[in-house]
Image (tube, helix red, strand yellow):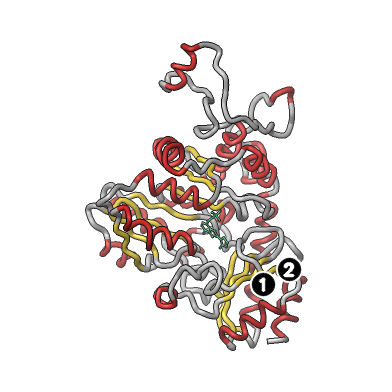
Amino acid sequence: MKDIAKKGLGTRSIHGGQMKPNAFGALATPIFQTSTFTFGTAEQARRCFALEEAGYVYSRAGNPTLTVAEEKIALLEQGEAALATSSGMGAISSVLWTFLSAGDHVISDKTLYGCTFELLNHHMKRFGVEVSFVDSADPEAVKNALRPETRIIYLESPANPNLKVVDLAEIARLGHENGNTLTVVDNTFATPYAQTPLTLGCDIVVHSATKYINGHGDLLAGFVVGKKELVDQVRVIGLKDMTGAVLPPMEAYLIIRGLKTFEIRMERICATAMKVAEYLSRHPKVDVVHYPGLPSHPGYAIAKKQMRSFGPMMGFELKGGLEAGKKLLDSVELCALAVSLGDAETLIQHPASMTHATYTPEERKAADIAEGLIRLSVGLENAEDIIADLEQALSKV
Ligand code: LCS
């Protein structure tokens, strides 16, 4: 479609990247469930392997169904290119293994998804990569941690699980000022509906597409987005040779299907999230609500500046602390007690004992992840029903 990059989010997610023409004029995207691709001649095979001719050779390096999903995500994030992976961790590890070598330095925020923290905090040093954990909501802390060998600044904004907001344009600027430093942002919590870090100057966006991008809680997937030159490196080094974290074609098809409703899902969910956050912030048993759309949130002004919407995720703490929080989790009926996020169903969980059990209590304290924090992933149910469920559960606390 002509000028697809200039169309609205809904149009881009439905029409972007579609094969033209689809086999037999099929409207839905065909699932190319194949591991390999045949060549007409030995010379053509040689040209494809020498990258003198474009074409698919083997599904670890590319597959037409994945290409459609990748082009849609690139259009949504306003990046030049995207790469699909088999999970969010597949996207993150493929990026890190591509750009890091022994002797390199990484600056990471202290507040991260638990497994990303585990990878950066425990495993990187086994390969001779040093990681400094800072509070990147304070750009001075990032500036002070920068070294000539800092190759990557890695962060989430809003962060999992406490919704910390970071000034992405400022951090990317500091990275570029330092020279060869890439700012990598996990945009899973915001989604491209609410925020596009590449347009703020960041170099690479990673996603767990398991979450709101797919939106139906029935698969795992990830994406890497950025300049074509960077994404190509992740494809041929991190994905093809190091992690092999390839997305199956059926999963790519389901993401393409889920994306058709991406904009309307996010519109509904973010509006509901705002109502739920306001409800919780007025409740006498609630101590604090962590939602970037509330003026009481420390990152509110920056969120207002860099986000188009305040997103679908929130955290909250009860006045009764951890014990009250457990009682609440045991009392919800509509909200599902489960990790993950971004499903049609509202999900509720306790980070300290579930997603962020990879942190020690001291590490959680340093990262401002309260032991009693409850995390809520708002779903597609009606706002009044989600609120009624929280109300009946809070009455039992
Ligand atoms: N990045 C963020 C911000 C995440 O929340 C997750 C998973 C990942 C990356 C990893 O993606 P995956 O490999 O699972 O597709 N977050 C989860 C969570 O908070 N609960 O369960 C999984």
Residue for badge 1:
276
Residue 351: x %, y % from top left: 54, 71
Residue 159: x %, y % from top left: 49, 64
Local crowd size for mark 1, using a 10 Å CA cut-off: few (<14), some (14–19), many (≥20): many
Q: Is residue 174 visible?
A: no
Q: Quadrant of the C terminus?
A: bottom right
Give the number of the disc on residue 21: none
Q: CA distance from mark 2 to mark 1?
A: 7 Å
Considering the numbered disc 2 on the image, is that residue within a helix, a strand or a loop?
A: helix
Q: Is residue 200 left or right of residue 254?
A: left
Specify the amino acid type for callout 2.
Ala
Q: Are marks 2 and 1 in contact (CB under 8 Å)?
A: yes
Residue 386: x %, y % from top left: 73, 71
Query: Ligand 1 near label 1 (Cβ, under 8 Å)?
Result: no
Residue for badge 2:
383
Q: Is residue 9 visible?
A: yes
Image vertical order of residue 64 relative to residue 284, above or below = above
Residue 151: x %, y % from top left: 30, 50
Specify the amino acid type for callout 1.
Val
Considering the numbered disc 1 on the image, is that residue within a helix, a strand or a loop?
A: helix
Q: Which sits earlier in the primary sequence, circle 2 or circle 1?
A: 1
Image vertical order of residue 16 relative to residue 335, above or below = above
Q: How many marks?
A: 2
